[in-house]
Structures are given as structure tokens and as C-alpha cells.
Image (spheres, helix red, strand yellow):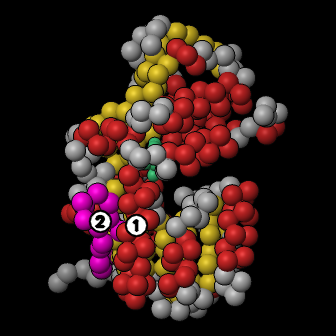
Amino acid sequence: MLKTPDEVDPAFRADVLAGLAEPIPSIPARWLYDLRGSELFDDITRLPSYYPTRTETALLEAKMPEIATLACRDCAIVEFGSGSSTKTPLLLETMKPRAYVPIDISGEYLRDSAARVDAQFPRLPVHPVEADFTKEVALPAAIEGLRRLGFFPGSTIGNFIPRSATDLLRHFRDILGTGSKLLIGMDRVKPVERLLAAYDDPQGVTAEFNLNLLHRINRELGADIPVDAFRHEARWHDMNGRVEMHLVAVRDTAFAIDGRRFAFAKGASIHTENSHKYGARGARLLLLAGGWTPLAEWTDAAGDFALILAEAQRNRFAP
Ligand code: AVI
């Protein structure tokens, strides 16, 4: 559906114009998720080669009684970026929290998922908050006085460069407060072939997800990007420990956005996403740097994915 100029987020336009003019052209990954992008991401989570979602879900199913005992006694669960909230029922069933606070930037998704949780858990108070969790978030007054458990599944933390990931974890600590806990999903480093297969599936769904960004720019910003002049590429950046998504020009090409011209020589790329993978110690160090002390962690038998429970302890400086 074509958006009128008033409906287009000005930050999208600004990020695209600034990002494409950078010496290494890039566009922030959050713009991958318009309605079509979110549908395609949902499809990705069901692909055989995309292991994170099913591994994390199985891990939650298998370990939930133990996680619940350590994580939540009479607590309020605050979910950051609840999206379609598919993993949430597992927590709610076992933890029996006193309240559930889903936070999501998309009001539409939020209302749908809150309604689903309401229907499934009629006695649970649900307080949806429509907000960008990277910015200021006011928690509902109704959960004042309750212990808090933050829930940040899916390895979404991996989509932030470590510096921003640390800022985000500190921000979660500020939102939830000292003494709160955080249950976070983190994808592990593994052989490159498996990582690349997860981000470049033979069905081409991830390619469509990545290329949808160019369609979105054309749709919303009235651009004339020849989408067939680009192809999806997943790359492993060993030094930075991440899978990167790029859109690579397959021929020399040029296009205009808002009257500004951009030229890409064959082989040049637009960097569209990072997905950092952590080893056991790296993951814990990231949490510690963000103000969260790891308490326990769970991984699947193959060690593909980790769920870590951490606590926002009062600051203590040795000795
Ligand atoms: C949302 N996020 C955790 C996904 C990931 O694995 O980094 C996004 C994604 N991009 C391509 N495939 C999945």
C-alpha cells in the first residue's frame, strides 16, 4: 500500500539519505520491519536452516520449571519488543506472574498479542505499552511495588553493535530498577557454514526480507531503485563476531531518492544488518558491562543458543 508523504516516518527518510551517503553505505536494520518485512521475518523463524527460534523455544519448554523458580516469584514480566509474543505463553503458564507488560513499537502487533494473552490468561492483568524500548519508557503504575523480570528473547541483542548493546542493557536496568532480573536469549558462535545457511536460506526468504528494504524505499520515499540490480548476501565478519547482511549491486546502477542521486558500481554494497554471535564468556561480559550480573544459564545440547538469567545488583566496587 502506498503511504502518503505525511504517513512516512521522517526518521526513515533521514536514515536512508544519510546512510546511503556514508563511505560504507548502510541503513539501520530496524527499517527492515515494515508490515511485509515483519511477515517475512515470521516466515524466516520457521525455516529449517534458521535454528535460533526453534532452539530457544525448545530450551524454554525444557527448562521452564527451573527458570521459573530462579527468575520470578510474584513478579511482573516486562517483555521488550514483544512482537507476536509467541514464546510468552510458556513463561506465563509456568511463572504465573502478577502482571504482564508487553512493550512494542508497533501498536497493531501490540494490541493483537495483548488480546491473545488476555484470552488465554483471563485472570492475568496485561498492561501493554506502545513504545520504542531503546528510548524513554514509563512502566505502568499498576506494577509499582512488584518485583520485575525483563524478558528479551530471540537474540535481538545481537542486532546491536556491542557498544549500543551495552547502552541498551544499561537502559533496561534503568527502566526495571535495581534488584530486577533479566532473562535474555543470545545466539552462540558456531561453524560459519551453519551461520551463513541461517542467513541465506535456499528458499530465498531471507533474500526477500533483505530486498524488501529497497521495495520499501521505493514505496514510501518515491524512489526508483532498480531492485533487480541488487542481490542479498550474508557475510561472516570474524573479527567482529557477526553475520552481516548486505545488498550487493550486480551491475553498475544509479537511482534517485528525494531528488538525490546515488550510484553503485558492480560489487558495491549496502550494509543492512548485523547479527552478533557470542561465546559463553563474551555473553556474560556483555551483560556485566551493561550492569547485569549473570546468575544462571541454559543451553541446548548442541550449545547453539543460550538463555541467561541476570540480576541488576546494587553497584559494588571491590574490595
Ligand atoms: C531479529 N533478529 C534477532 C534476527 C537475527 O537473527 O538477527 C533478524 C534476522 N535477520 C535475518 N534473519 C533473521
Asked if the residue at label 2 sits under 8 Å from ligand 1, the reply is no
Q: Residue furthest left?
A: 319
- Amino acid type of the residue that numbered disc 1 sits on in the rendered structure: Ala
Which residue is the site of mark 1? 58
The chief SS type of the magenta part is strand
| Residue 173 visible in the shown view | yes
Residue 312 showing in the rendered view:
no
As measured in the structure, the alpha-carbon distance from the residue carrying label 2 to the one carrying label 1 is 8 Å
Secondary structure at numbered mark 1: helix
Element class at badge 2: loop
The amino acid sitting under disc 2 is: Asp
Residue span colored magenta: 292-307
Question: What residue sits 82% from the left and 33% below the top?
Answer: 4
* Quarter holding residue 217: top right
The picture places residue 163, in percent across and down from the top left corner, at 36, 52
Which one is in front, 287 or 86? 86
The numbered disc on residue 300 is 2
Which quarter of the picture shows residue 318? bottom left
Where is residue 315? Give x, y as percent.
33, 80
Can you give x and y, in whole percent of width and height, for residue 102 in the image?
Answer: 62, 69
Front residue of this view, candidates 253 and 57: 57
Q: Is 7 in the magenta?
A: no
Answer above or below: position of 45 versus 63. Answer: above
Q: Residue at x 40, y 89 (%)?
A: 69
